[in-house]
Image (cartoon, helix red, strand yellow):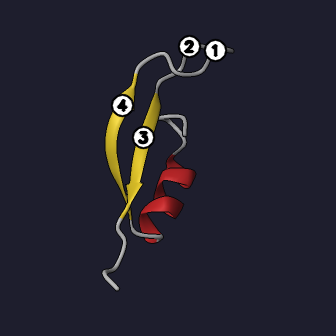
Amino acid sequence: MKRDNERAISLYQTLKFDLLRVRRHYYQDDGADAWEMVAKLAPN
């Protein structure tokens, strides 16, 4: 998701996602950076 999309970041964090890394110039339309996120999964 776009790095400046605070509402989406907050939503994903409430769903137990962590910010992993920034992907520079990810979006082709405007060259914006994106956050790569990863989910915390519970063990079985």
Kind of residue at disc 1 = Gln
Residue at left offset 34%, top offset 79%: 42
Which image quarter: residue 24? top left
Q: Few, some or many C-alpha atoms within 10 Å of disc 3 (few <14, some 14-19, many ≥20)?
A: some
- Residue 43 lies, with reference to residue 28, above or below; the image says below
Residue denoted by label 1: 28
Q: Few, some or many C-alpha atoms within 10 Å of disc 2 (few <14, some 14-19, many ≥20)?
A: few
Residue at left offset 42%, top offset 62%: 13
SS category of the residue bearing label 2: loop
Residue denoted by label 4: 22
Q: Tell me, for residue 36, which label it has, or none.
A: 3
> Quadrant location of the N terminus?
top right
Closer to the eye: label 3 or 2: 3
Residue at left offset 63%, top offset 14%: 28
Q: CA distance from mark 4 to mark 2?
A: 13 Å
Kind of residue at disc 3 = Glu
Q: Is residue 26 left or right of residue 18?
A: right
SS category of the residue bearing label 4: strand
Residue denoted by label 2: 31
Mark 2–mark 1 contact, CB under 8 Å? yes
Mark 4–mark 3 contact, CB under 8 Å? yes
